[in-house]
């Protein structure tokens, strides 16, 4: 492995990739199979649940892109500069769906949020934060 990716082992990247892929499949299955969970909600609550599902998908998609590009760097197929320029996560500290107002709304919605979706929201945010730290380390090392 080269550049800033050298400190990140292939096993770490593979494990994070597998975790993100499993969550993407879980999010897809939730969206497909749990429409009945949403039937008891008011229209504005259903809209927010759809928004939360899309936020999970957006977080995981960004993570997957970064992980695949990082694997390409580790294999010598992509430069670290290309990774940082084209696949880096937002550097303004912005976490998709984690602005303070959104987090407050998520907390307020926990009583109507299906447990499976709430779990996906939390796990996807945690994974994103871990990958964002790896991204920052990679940028700092290059």
Image: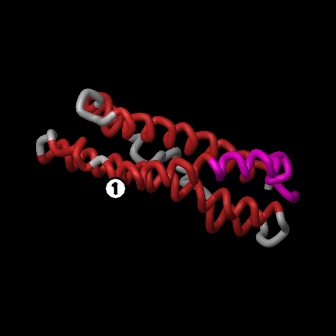
Which residue is found at the position 75% from the left and 45% from the top?
12
Direction from residue 113 to residue 92 in the image, left or right: right
Instruction: Please give the range of residues in magenta.
Output: 1-18
Q: Quadrant of residue 115?
A: top left
Q: Magenta span has 79?
A: no
Direction from residue 125 to residue 112 in the image, left or right: left
Residue 104: x percent and y percent?
31, 31
Q: Is residue 50 above or below residue 73?
A: above
Residue 128: x percent and y percent?
56, 45
Residue 108: x percent and y percent?
26, 29
Q: Main secondary structure of the magenta part?
A: helix
In the picture, the quarter occupied by the N terminus is bottom right
Direction from residue 30 to residue 64 in the image, left or right: right
Q: Magenta span has 4?
A: yes
Observer-nearest of 63 and 93: 63
Callout 1: few (<14), some (14-19), or many (20+) C-alpha neighbours within 10 Å?
few
Observer-nearest of 95 and 71: 71
């Amino acid at each position: 492995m080269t550049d800033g990716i050298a400190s990140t082992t292939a096993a770490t990247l593979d494990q994070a990739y597998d975790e993100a892929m499993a969550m993407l499949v879980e999010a897809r299955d939730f969206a497909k199979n749990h429409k009945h969970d949403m039937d008891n909600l008011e229209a504005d609550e259903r809209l927010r649940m759809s928004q939360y599902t899309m936020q999970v998908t957006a977080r995981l998609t960004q993570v997957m892109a970064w992980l695949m590009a990082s694997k390409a760097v580790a294999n010598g197929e992509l430069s670290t500069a290309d990774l940082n320029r084209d696949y880096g996560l937002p550097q303004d500290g912005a976490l998709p769906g984690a602005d303070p107002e959104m987090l407050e709304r998520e907390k307020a919605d926990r009583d109507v949020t299906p447990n499976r979706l709430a779990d996906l929201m939390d796990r996807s945010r945690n994974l994103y934060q871990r990958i964002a730290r790896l991204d920052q380390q990679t940028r700092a090392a290059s």
